Each structure stands twice: as C-alpha cells, then as structure tokens.
C-alpha cells in the first residue's frame, strides 16, 4: 500500500504561494529524492507531509498508522548545555537504553551513547539525528538536507548508511538534497521541484530532462554517470513528466 500520497498540493505563506499542484507518492521501501533550487519549496513540502504546515489546497494521505522518522535540516543545541547522546535520544521518545543503542548501531555510530552532544563532529551529530529518527522503527524516513555542512566523503558515507538502513529495515526514504550527483545515483526516483514538479522519474530520466537541465545545467549528467551503480531491487520506475508551468 502506498505510504504517502500528495494530490494537487498548494502551500502558501500569506499571499506568497510557494507550491502549486504538487503530486507525489512514495511506495514501501523506495528511495525518493527531491531536488530543486533554493526556495523551490522542498522543505515546505516535507513540512506539509508531517503536518507542520497547513496546505492551502490539495490532499495529503498517509497510510493508516504510518510511522514517520524525521531528520531535520539542522538542529541547534546550546553548546554549553551538558547532555549526553543517550539523554538527547530519550528526550522525545520513551525508549530503553537498549533501543537507543540499537538505533545508534543502525545509524553506523555504535560507540556514541555516553558522549556529550557538544563534543560530536558534524557527521556524528547527523548520525545521532538519524538514530533518533530510527528509534521507533519508522515505515518511512524523511530527511531534509541531512548532510548540510558535511564534507564530500562525509556526506557520501551518510548516504551509504541510508542505503544500508533501507536494505536492513526495508523502510522507505523521502529526502531532500543538493548533492545531486551523490544522491541521484542512490535514488530509485527523483522529483525535481521548482514551485511545481518540473520533472520526475529515474535518476537517468531526470538528469536528461530539459526541465532539469534548465535548472541545473548539464554538468550533473556527467557526474551522475560517474557515480552510478546498479540497483538490484524491483521497483516500479514510473516515468511521468509534467509540463513546466
Ligand atoms: N514560515 C515561512 N513563512 C514565510 N515564508 C516562508 C516560510 N517558510 C518558507 N518560506 C518561503 O517559502 C519559499 C520556499 O521555501 P522552502 O524552505 O520550502 O524552500 P527550499 O526549497 O527548501 O529552500 P532551500 O533549498 O533554500 O532550503 C521561500 O521563498 C521561503 O522564503
């Protein structure tokens, strides 16, 4: 059963309509990446999906009982506040230490439980946010530019971890990213957003779509080829194109 269905969604802040007629669906176990220029409405779309932003129009349907794990773009913790990783992870979830430890292991950072949040590197911090999102065994992970501030190897490692999480837990991933060449190769489907859905499909289809090239140029096509690898899972790669408005 489809996990998330977005139909004809519009989002507005006052008189400023930032998303128009957006359609999107996420199926169990697939990795869908949203790309788009700054201010194209990517975060607004995720916030509408988690119910943090009220749609101006349209429908968002979640599978009944859907468990969502959300990894925010960034989270500021006062560096003078002493708080361990374990306490941080248990702030919002009533979970056991064993569950925290299991989530940290799934996020690829098994040794951080007792560490101070303020002493973590950027990459470790993001892994802890990932672990926190994994704690309740979500059906889908929503990641909003989760590798912001990480260097290239750090973000490549993070996305590899995401693929591992998907492989081991079977959860679906809906993520926003600017690192087109890395994430596109790791995605089953890419949705290119610019206030509306410009184009959508497999990474190869989107990279060669004129709408995508108009926004990002042609350079990414080459980089995409460089980073591509074969996927061995069965997903329905629907290719839909909407005319640019
Ligand atoms: N709470 C808000 N109130 C008013 N305007 C907002 C609000 N949040 C976002 N916007 C505006 O909506 C537009 C889309 O913003 P959004 O953050 O969704 O884009 P984005 O694609 O995620 O951008 P970025 O890549 O820079 O993170 C922008 O013009 C932004 O200024």
Image: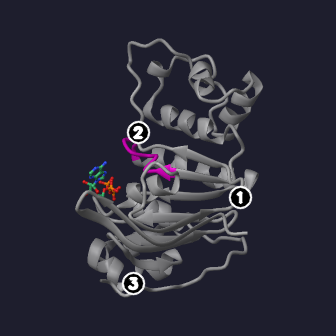
Determine which residue is flagged by label 2. Answer: 74
Q: Quadrant of the N terminus?
A: bottom right
Q: Main secondary structure of the magenta part?
A: loop
Q: Is residue 145 above or below residue 184?
A: above
- Mark 1 vs mark 2, foreground winner is 1
- Mark 1 vs mark 3, foreground winner is 1
Give left or right: position of 42 versus 158.
left
Which residues, given as a range, are shown in magenta?
Answer: 143-151
Q: Residue at x 68, y 75 (%)?
A: 235
Q: Residue at x 62, y 37 (%)?
A: 131
Q: Quadrant of residue 109?
A: top right
- Mark 3 vs mark 2, foreground winner is 2
Which numbered marker is on residue 49? none
Residue farthest left in this picture: 15
Label 1, secondary structure: give it.
loop
Determine which residue is flagged by label 1. Answer: 64
**Labels 1 and 3: the sequence-earlier one:** 1
Determine which residue is flagged by label 3. Answer: 209
Q: Quadrant of the C terminus?
A: bottom left
């Amino acid at each position: 059963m489809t996990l998330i269905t977005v139909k004809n969604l519009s989002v507005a802040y006052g008189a400023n309509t930032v998303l128009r007629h957006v359609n999107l669906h996420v199926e169990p176990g697939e990795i869908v990446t949203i790309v788009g220029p700054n201010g194209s409405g990517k975060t607004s779309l995720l916030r509408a999906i988690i119910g943090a932003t009220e749609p101006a129009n349209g429908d968002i349907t979640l599978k009944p009982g859907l468990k969502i794990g959300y990894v925010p773009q960034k989270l500021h913790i006062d560096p003078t506040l002493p708080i361990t990783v374990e306490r941080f992870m248990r702030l919002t979830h009533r979970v056991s230490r064993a569950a925290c430890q299991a989530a940290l292991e799934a996020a690829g950072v098994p040794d951080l439980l007792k560490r101070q949040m303020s002493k973590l590197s950027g990459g470790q911090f993001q892994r802890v946010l990932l672990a926190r999102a994994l704690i309740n065994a979500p059906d889908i992970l929503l990641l909003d530019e989760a590798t912001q501030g990480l260097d290239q190897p750090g973000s490549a490692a993070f996305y590899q971890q995401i693929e591992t999480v998907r492989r081991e837990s079977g959860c679906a991933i809906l993520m926003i990213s600017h690192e087109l060449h890395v994430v596109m190769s790791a995605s089953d489907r890419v949705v290119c957003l610019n206030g509306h859905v410009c184009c959508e499909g497999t990474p190869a289809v989107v990279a060669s779509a004129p709408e995508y090239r108009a926004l990002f140029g042609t350079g990414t096509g080459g980089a995409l080829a460089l980073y591509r690898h074969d996927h061995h899972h069965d997903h329905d790669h629907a290719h839909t194109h909407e005319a640019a408005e």
